[in-house]
Amino acid sequence: MKSIFPFIPADLEPRTLVCGKCRHEFALPLTKRYGHKLSHVQPLDFHPVNNNVYWHLHSLGIPCPKCRENTQFLLPETPFKVVLPLYGDEACRQKEARCVYVLAFVGSDPRLEHAVRQEWDAMKTNIAPAQPPASWRLHMKELWKTSGGRRHPVFDSLTREQRVAATKKIADCYHSLNDRVFSFIAVYRAPKLSRATKQQALLSALAYMLERLCPRGTAPKITLESDQFAAGRPGMSYGTAHALEEFQRSLLYAILCRGLPVEDIAVARATESFWFELADYVAYVVARACLRRWQGTAPDLDPNTLGKAFWIGNQPGGNLFCDRCEGVPWEKFGGWPTTP
Ligand SMILES: [Zn+2]
């Protein structure tokens, strides 16, 4: 079975432990599967502001590979400051024997959410002045579709030019929110879409978020959009939930979380948060730009307008590249055709 750990940060500290008995220095078993989750435990009435007391692991006995004696390993800890809710959506494009799977996560400090929502709603009102912004959902596939599909309360009445103008308004709005909105974007290539590709993208993105956010005392709280609600079976597919739990049973996960209350990944309906509209937009723009590269055509939705984002993607050799930058780091990801 392929490892579920595609992403171990190169500068992860600590990586070794010295045995208290024989002084042998050995590598920490980062990916060993423990019999229980090493994530925190929080009471049912936990609240990030009013009741933020939770239990977490301070240390763990690790057996020395030479003398078998346990040495206590103190887990790194960072004082807890804030929960950062991040909302995720996916997009996938296939061209012949190539597939790209994009997972986009967006969110802001909860204290800024109201202002972000106001700007987003103002943009929606600008597109459709007669419709209350909360009454309709901005869904890129429906905005860009040429014919067929479900009826949309706003887009159906728009001309081609109005749709292009609406797209520009969305792009400008998203760009103006860049200083308040976190964007984490995973770009995964595979010959075809499989459960393994989705798992790797999700776990890599999660590990990257933990690595970037937890040292600041920020605990990400991820909610994924699930269209499985429509099929009457809410929740992540078994394979993904299983892979996530494997990750949570590893020392790597506990080190990355730094003792913060990082909650399990949740799923929700698209209508449950306006953030899913932003996540849908980001995933759509990036997946479309990937497809256009393969087609040898210039992007019609410029991913540079997304502003600065945290990118993670698999390279042709099997390694991962991740960095915060503006626009898709095509060269760093490697193997992408240059733009025409
Ligand atoms: Zn020893």
Image (cartoon, grey):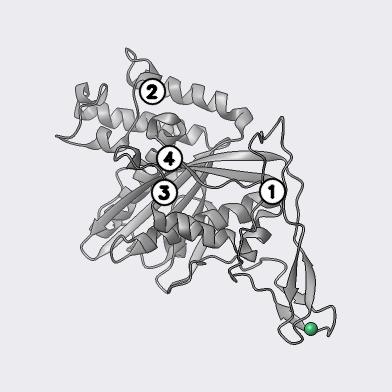
For this orientation, the residue located farthest to the left is 148
Per the image, label 3 sits on a secondary structure element best described as loop
- Is the residue 86 above or below the residue 317 in the image? above
What residue sits right under mark 1 in the picture? Answer: 260
Question: Of marks 2 and 3, which one's residue comes earlier in the chain?
Answer: 2
Left or right: 308 with respect to 285? right
Q: Which mark is in front, 4 or 2? A: 4
Q: Quadrant of ligand 1?
A: bottom right
Q: Amino acid at mark 2?
A: Lys
Q: Which mark is residue 236?
A: 3
Mark 3 vs mark 1, CA separation in Å: 23 Å
Q: Are marks 4 and 1 in contact (CB under 8 Å)?
A: no
Which amino acid does the dot numbered 1 rest on?
A: Leu
Instruction: Reply above or below: 136 against 27.
Output: above
The earlier-in-sequence mark between 3 and 4 is 3
Reply above or below: 10 against 236: below
Which residue is at 77% across, 57% downward?
Answer: 58
Which residue is label 4 attached to?
A: 279
Q: Which mark is residue 124?
A: 2
